[in-house]
Image: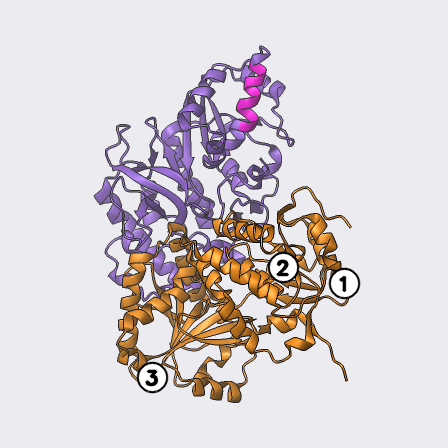
């Protein structure tokens, strides 16, 4: 079982060649698995005349557009084996992706996530502030992207509080007490970028002007969900960092890139502001005209591969995001693997993103 | 009656003009004043060389052409315009509103035209030209013309719908559904342009024998890529008949690619959309992707034409393809939604025989390749002049 082997390797330790060998083996295996167990997937491969035995590298494998998972149910396990269904975010009226997870895939997602994130936070659990409202995770059968993100990261928290109430109001009292109680300890903060800005930062700023301050200089913030809404408020990455530090001393901040269609394999931002692919996944930039692989530095459409998905054919996907590779195996942070940047959604694409329907109201 | 609303903008005409439309003198189809007005509009517009679609409209509404159209009607003297036509024109085609308006006026009506919401320059060019004419030599036409712009607001649609004798709805099923939320008077009739799709039939042997192949390719381009292959007239399935289909296809698509790569710009989001559409149909139907070097042309060979194939249609150069022995093989796609057949090298008798024998439910137009977008007063199966006028009988 290749996946278990992968779990035993430090997540950013393999160079391009080693990783390529391992990923190719695993992804070819997954392609065969899904071809055998997912009728629709087999039909797709047949239509393009794809012969998996001729694949030299994982880069040769077909990639399905993520939109397909909004249009149809794609599963490689019987319905009875499905333990969780994840849905993507989408503004009201949009269709959402439905991702079916069996026990193995669900558990591998969690294991992978732990491996990746603890490379940044350390392996011990910390008191955790979730910058969101509790109602997001109420429904435990259907998971929205926001809920899934929160639950996924919750395993890193020992004691947890939600910083916002269900009206998205900051619970300043609760936070004060929480910080008092865990004074001197490292605190984990997690939330979605836009939510943090709108309901956390802005409120902290307002309180600060009234003389009420919070010290989060001991905190580590992990945030995701994209920059789209912040760009429309003209807030850049650097400004986000600076303002957060100004308002509460928070300076250890990591963005991540990920999607519900490949939960577990998130791409964390390192100390140098670069998003990193771990051993478990990879990013390939495709040229829009013919989907050939773009060069380092060249902007194109982002393809993502993940070694996890066994219950649905989502191991190789074409996103609707645009970005470019910054380098391979040579990031100054010392992590191996590709590092890259995201430019944002393809222009005029159906609006996706990981911040749920909520962001659409603003 | 309330004819002023917040958000409602009168680009040509005024609320008073609309209010008075019920009282204006009725016109006959092809009225001299109307033809003279359209002819002057034609001259105005043909000065403008910037937009081919504006020029096409200008060319279409010149006097000589309109008089030729008039010749096709033997009962003009017994007809009058029905009264007021409310046109809801498509938001994504810049000049379509002008044709709809001209047809309404030619049929003898006063016209309330809802302009496209998108800020197309063509709309401004045509509206300005009309305003100039109405201010000078054609003041007598002013009571018959109002151009309006408004966001989707039911109360505004309600007001114009309640006034009109004919409602013309362009823009497909969703727009038709939406506008039908607004009531029309009992005697009012509707012309609705629903979602349609179109096909092409090419005779392989005639194509191979053709000397001016590049002209054929240009015509095909005009029918398809020119409008992102997303017009109701754009062919989505290409049928090949004749003996040497393989050879013809290879030559044809090679040349199409040459033209497309030079002229067409495919946005990344279109590439993704086409890939998605391809997998979407492949998951449900037996299709085979034909060899293609990039995403500019996506060709899916199908073995059989099932009735729901067009549920999987897509645009931006996305074609289903099939070899056929005779026109009878296309009957399955000729359902109620099928609008135009463009053809190359197929003889008129063959189509007549097919229509006679197979009696398809759909197909409203059969036109030579390259002519799919040419507007005519008979459109989508409707005779616009007759549908927007009434016939008075004296016995």
Q: How far apart in space, not on screen, are marks 2 and 1 (Cα)? A: 16 Å
The disc numbered 1 marks a residue on which chain? Answer: B
Q: Is residue B215 above or below residue A149?
A: below
Q: Any magenta on residue B65? A: no
Q: Position of residue A123 (x, y in %)?
A: 40, 29
Q: Position of residue A335 (x, y in %)?
A: 28, 32
Q: Position of residue A355 (x, y in %)?
A: 52, 38
Which residue was labeled with disc 1?
B185
The disc numbered 3 marks a residue on which chain? Answer: B
Report helix, strand or loop for mark 1: loop
Which residue was labeled with disc 3?
B242
Q: Position of residue B166 (x, y in %)?
A: 68, 64
Q: Main secondary structure of the magenta part?
A: helix
Q: Colour of chain A?
A: purple
Q: Earlier in the sequence, mark 3 or mark 2?
A: 2
Magenta part of the protein: which range? A198-208
Note whether residue B288 is visible: yes
């Amino acid at each position: 079982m290749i996946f278990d082997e992968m779990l035993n390797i430090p997540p950013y330790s393999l160079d391009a060649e080693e990783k390529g060998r391992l990923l190719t083996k695993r992804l070819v295996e997954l392609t065969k698995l899904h071809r055998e167990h997912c009728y629709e997937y087999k039909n797709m491969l047949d239509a393009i005349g794809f012969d998996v035995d001729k694949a030299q590298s994982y880069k040769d494998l077909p990639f399905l557009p993520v939109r397909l998972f909004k249009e149809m149910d794609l599963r490689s396990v019987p319905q009875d084996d499905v333990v969780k269904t994840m849905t993507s975010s989408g503004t009201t009226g949009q269709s959402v992706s439905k991702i079916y997870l069996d026990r193995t895939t669900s558990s591998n997602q969690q294991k992978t996530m732990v491996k990746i994130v603890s490379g940044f936070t350390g392996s011990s659990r910390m008191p955790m502030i979730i910058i969101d409202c509790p109602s997001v995770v109420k429904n435990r059968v259907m998971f929205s992207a926001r809920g899934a993100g929160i639950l996924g990261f919750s395993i890193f928290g020992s004691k947890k509080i939600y910083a916002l109430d269900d009206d998205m109001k900051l619970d300043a009292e609760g936070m004060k007490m929480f910080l008092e109680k865990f004074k001197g300890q490292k605190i984990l903060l997690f939330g979605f970028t836009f939510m943090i800005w709108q309901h956390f930062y802005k409120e902290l700023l307002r309180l600060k002007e009234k003389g009420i301050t919070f010290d989060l200089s001991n905190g580590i913030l992990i945030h995701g969900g994209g920059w789209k809404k912040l760009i429309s408020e003209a807030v850049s990455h650097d400004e986000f960092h600076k303002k957060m530090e100004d308002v509460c001393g928070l300076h250890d901040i990591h963005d991540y890139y990920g999607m519900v269609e490949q939960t577990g394999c998130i791409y964390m931002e390192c100390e140098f502001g670069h998003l990193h692919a771990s051993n478990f996944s990879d990013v390939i930039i495709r040229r829009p005209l013919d989907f050939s692989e773009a060069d380092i530095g060249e902007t194109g459409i982002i393809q993502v591969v993940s070694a996890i998905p066994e219950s649905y054919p989502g191991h190789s996907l074409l996103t609707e995001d645009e970005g470019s590779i910054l380098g391979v195996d040579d990031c100054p942070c010392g992590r191996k693997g590709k590092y890259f940047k995201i430019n944002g959604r393809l222009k005029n694409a159906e609006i996706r993103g990981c911040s749920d329907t909520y962001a659409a109201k603003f | 009656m309330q004819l002023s609303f917040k958000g409602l903008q009168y680009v040509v005409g005024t609320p008073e003009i609309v209010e008075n439309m019920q009282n204006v003198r009725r016109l006959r189809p092809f009225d001299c004043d109307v033809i003279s007005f359209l002819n002057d509009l034609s001259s105005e517009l043909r000065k403008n060389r910037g937009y081919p679609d504006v020029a096409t409209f200008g060319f279409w509404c010149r006097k000589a052409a309109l008089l030729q159209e008039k010749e096709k009607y033997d009962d003009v003297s017994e007809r009058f315009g029905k009264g007021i036509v409310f046109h809801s024109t498509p938001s994504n085609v810049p000049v379509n509103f002008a044709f709809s308006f001209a047809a309404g006026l030619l049929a003898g009506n006063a016209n309330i035209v809802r302009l496209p919401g998108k800020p197309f320059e063509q709309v401004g060019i045509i509206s300005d030209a009309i305003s100039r004419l109405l201010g000078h030599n054609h003041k007598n036409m002013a009571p018959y013309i109002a151009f309006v712009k408004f966001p989707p607001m039911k109360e505004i649609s309600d007001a114009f719908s309640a006034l009109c004798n004919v409602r013309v709805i362009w823009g497909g099923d969703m727009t038709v559904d939406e506008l039908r939320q607004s009531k029309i008077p009992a005697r009012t009739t509707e012309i609705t342009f629903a979602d349609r799709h179109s096909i092409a039939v090419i005779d392989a042997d005639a194509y191979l024998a053709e000397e001016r192949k590049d002209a054929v390719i240009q015509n095909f381009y005009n029918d398809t890529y020119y409008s992102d292959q997303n017009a109701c007239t754009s062919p989505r399935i290409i049928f090949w008949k004749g003996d040497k289909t393989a050879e013809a296809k290879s030559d044809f698509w090679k040349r199409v690619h040459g033209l497309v790569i030079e002229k067409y710009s495919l946005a990344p989001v279109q590439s993704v959309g086409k890939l998605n559409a391809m997998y979407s149909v492949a998951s449900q139907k037996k299709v085979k992707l034909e060899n293609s070097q990039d995403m500019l042309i996506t060709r899916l060979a199908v073995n059989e034409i099932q009735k729901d194939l067009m549920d999987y249609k897509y645009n931006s150069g996305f074609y289903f393809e099939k070899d056929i022995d005779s026109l009878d093989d296309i009957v399955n796609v000729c359902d109620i939604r099928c609008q135009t057949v463009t053809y190359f090298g197929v003889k008129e008798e063959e189509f007549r025989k097919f229509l006679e024998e197979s009696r398809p439910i759909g197909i409203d137009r059969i036109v030579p390749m390259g002519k799919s977008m040419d507007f005519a007063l008979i459109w989508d199966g409707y005779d616009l002049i007759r549908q927007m006028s009434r016939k008075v009988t004296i016995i």
